[in-house]
Image (cartoon, rainbow, N blue to C red):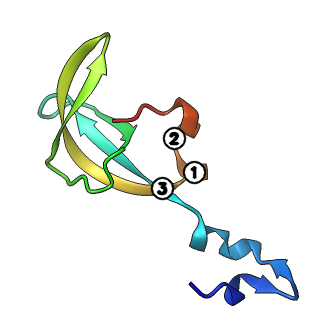
């Protein structure tokens, strides 16, 4: 990676910070066909739409279907990173 484009006169260019910031895979899942979608941070970076995942709700494992995947920067997450549920 060429870092010169991120600096000018020794200063970091803030408009380019998202070029190198981490993006997180956020998956939207449904608990049954046609139900409301819920967002989770995915620990599996190779997840695909249609995959089945297990979510624990009230100590009960539930199988859900991945309906959409978004790659978001931390400031775009719907909740603080530490507060988001991860699967």
Label 1 or label 2, whichever lies nearer to me, is 1
Lateral position of residue 5 relative to residue 62, left or right: right
- Residue 73 image position (x, y, % from top left): 54, 56
CB within 8 Å, label 2 to label 3: no
- SS class of the residue under badge 3? strand
Snapshot quadrant of residue 58? top left
- Residue 11 image position (x, y, % from top left): 85, 79
- Residue 46 image position (x, y, % from top left): 26, 57
Lateral position of residue 37 relative to residue 72, left or right: left
Lateral position of residue 77 relative to residue 15, left or right: left
Q: Spatial distance from mark 1 to mark 2, Cα to Cα?
A: 9 Å
Question: Which residue in the protein does label 3 denote?
Answer: 72
Residue shown at 48%/55% (left/top)?
72
Which circle's residue, 2 or 3, is located before the other in the chain?
3
Q: Please tell me the numbered disc located at residue 74.
A: 1
CB within 8 Å, label 3 to label 1: yes
Quadrant the C terminus occupies: top left
Residue shown at 48%/33% (left/top)?
84
10 Å crowding of disc 2: few (<14), some (14-19), many (20+):
few
Q: Please tell me the numbered disc located at residue 78.
A: 2
State the residue in front, 63 or 33: 63
- SS class of the residue under badge 1? helix
- In the picture shown, does residue 66 fall above or below 63? below
């Amino acid at each position: 990676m060429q870092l010169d484009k991120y600096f000018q006169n020794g200063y970091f260019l803030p408009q380019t910070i998202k070029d190198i910031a981490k993006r997180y895979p956020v998956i939207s899942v449904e608990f049954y066909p046609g139900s409301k979608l819920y967002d989770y941070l995915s620990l599996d970076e190779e997840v695909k739409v249609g995959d089945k995942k297990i979510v624990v709700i009230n100590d009960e494992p539930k199988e859900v279907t991945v309906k959409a995947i978004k790659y978001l920067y931390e400031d775009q997450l719907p909740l603080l990173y530490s507060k988001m549920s991860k699967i």
